[in-house]
Amino acid sequence: MIASFPRLVEEFDYCLPEELIAQYPASERTESRLLRLSSTEMVDGVFSDVLNLLQPHDCLVVNDTRVIKARLFATKLTGGQVEIMLDRLLNAREVLAMLRASKAPKIGSVLQLQEHTAQVLDRHSDQYRLRFSTDVLPLLETQGTVPLPPYIRHVPQEQDLQRYQTVYAAADKPGAVAAPTAGLHFDEALLAAIKAKGVKLAQVTLHVGAGTFAPVRATEISKHIMHSEWFSVPLATVEAIKAAKAAGGRCVAVGTTSVRALESAALGGDLQAVSGDTSIFITPGFQFNVVDALITNFHLPKSTLLMLVSAFAGSEPIRQAYAHAIAQRYRFFSYGDAMWLDKNQDNSRA
């Protein structure tokens, strides 16, 4: 029997009570709830259960990107206010960004940021290419704010500086404008216990772009144009995953960003060390070559991330799991609770 996969974006819609959108993180990172979904069962638990779900010889792959303070506020020479949301660092002084203003700035116009400026060089669709008069990263540290997602209503606070960043974010890997949120549930003690159990910890880097929040405007999945993000899968990670599988272990990815990086590096069938851009769009019917289990948060209705987890665990199982999570009052999205998903080996259950 040939599996039939969803084709329409509306098939990934669901109704979420607004009060289940987490506005703040749990008091401790590992105190979030965890819903485990496998081919045979659905189990409610807590995030620290991850320690028991991982087995010796498994390889746990995390995204070590560091979130930058990607939101800036500027003024046009005419006096109008402009919000700059960085999407991607191009070099020390140039970025791609989305701008919010009462009237779109023209190409060539100059935006004032206290003692520095940003010039609009070009525009493509909703992305602007900007050149700053100073290096961008130091400027963001002094003038930028934490780029909390639009569904989090509070103004960024001091705790967001720590909690909207994974504990393993690498100091030399700045570039994400949104957190790889599945990783927010890990603390140093849990990671130490995981390593002590014999689980190998490996890293990939994928700088999450602002496109992760962009709505899918197409009616059919096949018509959606996926945003591009920079990623890297180092040789050490490739070797760690292959060694784990040779020893009977699994590749367990932390977050959809880790999945996108790993599967982008294995589109030819065999996992390779690679760096570059990826616009991989994972939807039901996708053939996974690397990842065996996935730790992830709950994703927005009709989002590309919901399509990815549906491809991984099966569309109908995911629908049932989300209905269960809503009924059980799980907390959703970036600061919300988590899921453990085993890969669905039976495509007929798509």
Image (spheres, rainbow, N blue to C red):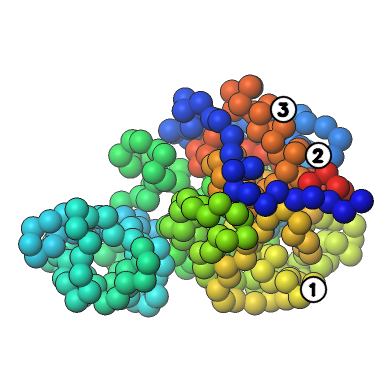
Residue 109: image tag: none
Q: What residue type is labelled 1?
A: Asp
Residue at 9% x, 65% y is 77
Asked if residue 138 shows in the view, the reply is: yes
Element carrying mark 2: loop
Position of residue 257 measured from the top left corner of the image (x, y, whole percent):
59, 57
Q: Is residue 298 left or right of residue 295?
A: left
Q: Residue at x 78, y 31 (%)?
A: 42
Q: How crowded is mark 3: few (under 14 residues within 10 Å), some or many (20 or more)?
A: some
Residue positioned 29% across, 66% down in the render? 138
Give the amino acid at mark 3. Answer: Asp
Q: Is mark 3 on a helix, strand or loop?
A: strand
Where is mark 3, residue-wise?
Answer: 44
Q: Residues within 10 Å of mark 1 (few under 14, many from 20)?
A: few
Task: Please state which amino acid type lies under the numbered disc 2.
Answer: Ser
Query: Can the viewer see residue 54 in this picture?
Result: no
In the picture, residue 37 is in which quadrant?
top right
How far apart are the two marked residues, 1 and 2, measured between alpha carbons? 25 Å
Between disc 3 and disc 1, whose residue precedes?
Answer: 3
Residue on which disc 1 sits:
270
Q: Which mark is residue 38?
A: 2
Name the N-terminal-most of marks 1 and 2.
Answer: 2
Where residue 224 appears, x then y in whole percent? Answer: 55, 60
Residue 287: image location, x then y, percent:
78, 61
Whether residues under marks 2 and 3 lie with C-beta atoms below 8 angstroms apart, the answer is no
